[in-house]
Structures are given as structure tokens and as C-alpha cells.
């Protein structure tokens, strides 16, 4: 066999070997896209709302239309689970800071005390950009109705919480909402592992 034919054979062999290796590598390392559940009855979507953010601006569902967003309920004077929750929420905020497709809505459960001014002061602890991380106050019934009927969260135990007028939603859950307004996950906001899972799930939704 001539030297030219040997060279061609060797080149062909290595091309085939490389193709086989790349196919094997792809099959081994490829991971199927994670499919997140849709929570709630068929067709459930977050309803419209009108709350006031830390800058006194009215926020509605238009502000999160087509966005992925995370929801929580807390109150600024809380000495129980809220500080830990918002410490963990900063992990979410930092992971997507500046990403216009990701928002955070932090609702008060005590609007009587959590005025716009109080929410502003609280938000400054986290250097929160009000365009991305909104601290919302407003009518108590509307805030609670959104929690129960749109975000599908209920009260959780917190021994340091105060029962506000015997009707106090104080949940430790972070709720993940997709671009279509569907609930795609609920996560324990005091648990770093679940918060990291939330961050990962947001990244999955961003691929869509």
C-alpha cells in the first residue's frame, strides 16, 4: 500500500474514531430537560392584583407578564422565620440580578404596620432594585386572597409570629410562577437546599 493510501486510511480511521467518541460522550453527558410540575387545578393562573411597592408605585400583573417570578409572604417586624427567609431570598436575587426575565414579589401580611416607608427601609437592607425585587403592601384582604387563591399557600407555624386579627397567613414557602402565570413549585424558604433547588428550577424555566 502506498504512503498516500496509508495516510488516507489513518485520517479516515481517526475521523471515525472521533465521531464514535463524540457520540458516546453526548449520550453519557446529556441530561434530559427537567419537567416541573404545574400546581393547582387545570387551567389555574395567577389573577390580577394591584399593590404598592417600596417606592410607592402601583404594581399589577402587567409588571410580571411574560416573566418568571418568585413570591413570598412576610412582615418587617417578624423575629421568627422571616429574617432567614429573606436571607435566603437574597441568594435567589443575587443569582439572577439584572436579569429582566426574573422578578421577586415580597408581600407583607401586616399592611397596617408595613407602610410604603417601612417596606422601603426594609428593602434597603438587601440593596433591592425595586424594578426586580418588589416589596408589596396594600389591602389586607386582597393580599391574603392572592396568597390563598392565586399562589395556593396557607399558614405555617412560627412561634415568634403574632396572630394579626385572628387571620394571619404566615407561610415559609417561596412560590415559583412561570411566564404563563402557572404555579410551578413551592419551596421551604428557610431551607438552603430547597432554595438552591428553586434557583435551579428558575434556570430550567429560563430555557423555555
Image (cartoon, rainbow, N blue to C red):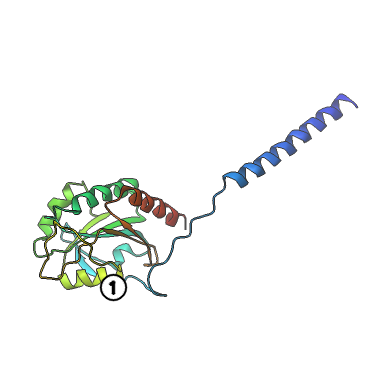
56 versus 146 height, above or below: above
Which residue is rendered at x = 26% and y = 71% of the image?
148
State how many labels appear: 1
Q: Nearer the viewer, residue 16 or 175?
A: 175
On the question of residue 171 being in view, the answer is yes
Within-10-Å neighbours for mark 1: few <14, some 14–19, many 20+: some
Would residue 66 appear left or right of 20 to someone viewing this image? left
Extreme-right residue of the structure? 1
Where is the N terminus found, in terms of image quarters? top right
Q: Nearer the viewer, residue 64 or 150?
A: 150
Q: Which residue is mark 1?
A: 149
84 versus 108 height, above or below: above
Q: Nearer the viewer, residue 11 or 44?
A: 44
Which residue is rendered at x = 14% and y = 54% of the image?
120
Residue 178, x across and y down, in percent = 38, 62
Residue 75, x across and y down, in percent = 15, 58
194 versus 176 height, above or below: above
Would residue 9 appear left or right of 92 to someone viewing this image? right
Residue 22, x across and y down, in percent = 65, 41
Dot 1: element: helix
Q: Quadrant of residue 180?
A: bottom left
Amino acid at each position: 500500500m502506498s504512503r498516500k493510501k496509508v495516510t488516507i486510511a489513518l485520517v479516515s480511521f481517526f475521523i471515525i474514531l472521533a465521531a464514535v467518541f463524540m457520540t458516546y460522550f453526548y449520550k453519557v453527558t446529556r441530561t434530559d430537560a427537567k419537567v416541573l410540575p404545574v400546581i393547582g387545578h387545570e387551567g389555574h393562573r395567577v389573577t390580577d392584583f394591584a399593590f404598592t411597592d417600596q417606592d410607592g408605585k402601583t404594581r399589577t400583573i402587567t409588571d410580571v407578564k411574560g416573566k418568571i417570578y418568585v413570591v413570598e409572604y412576610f412582615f418587617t417586624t417578624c423575629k421568627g422565620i422571616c429574617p432567614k427567609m429573606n436571607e435566603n431570598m437574597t441568594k435567589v436575587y443575587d443569582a439572577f440580578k439584572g436579569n429582566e426575565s426574573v422578578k421577586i414579589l415580597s408581600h407583607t401580611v401586616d399592611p397596617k404596620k408595613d407602610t410604603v416607608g417601612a417596606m422601603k427601609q426594609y428593602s434597603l437592607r438587601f440593596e433591592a432594585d425595586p424594578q426586580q425585587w418588589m416589596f408589596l403592601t396594600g389591602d389586607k384582604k386582597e393580599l391574603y386572597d392572592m396568597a390563598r387563591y392565586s399562589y395556593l399557600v396557607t399558614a405555617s407555624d412560627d412561634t415568634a409570629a403574632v396572630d394579626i386579627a385572628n387571620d394571619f397567613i404566615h407561610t415559609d414557602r417561596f412560590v415559583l410562577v412561570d411566564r404563563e402565570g402557572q404555579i410551578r413549585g413551592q419551596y421551604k424558604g428557610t431551607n438552603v437546599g430547597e432554595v438552591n433547588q428553586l434557583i435551579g428550577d428558575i434556570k430550567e424555566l429560563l430555557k423555555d
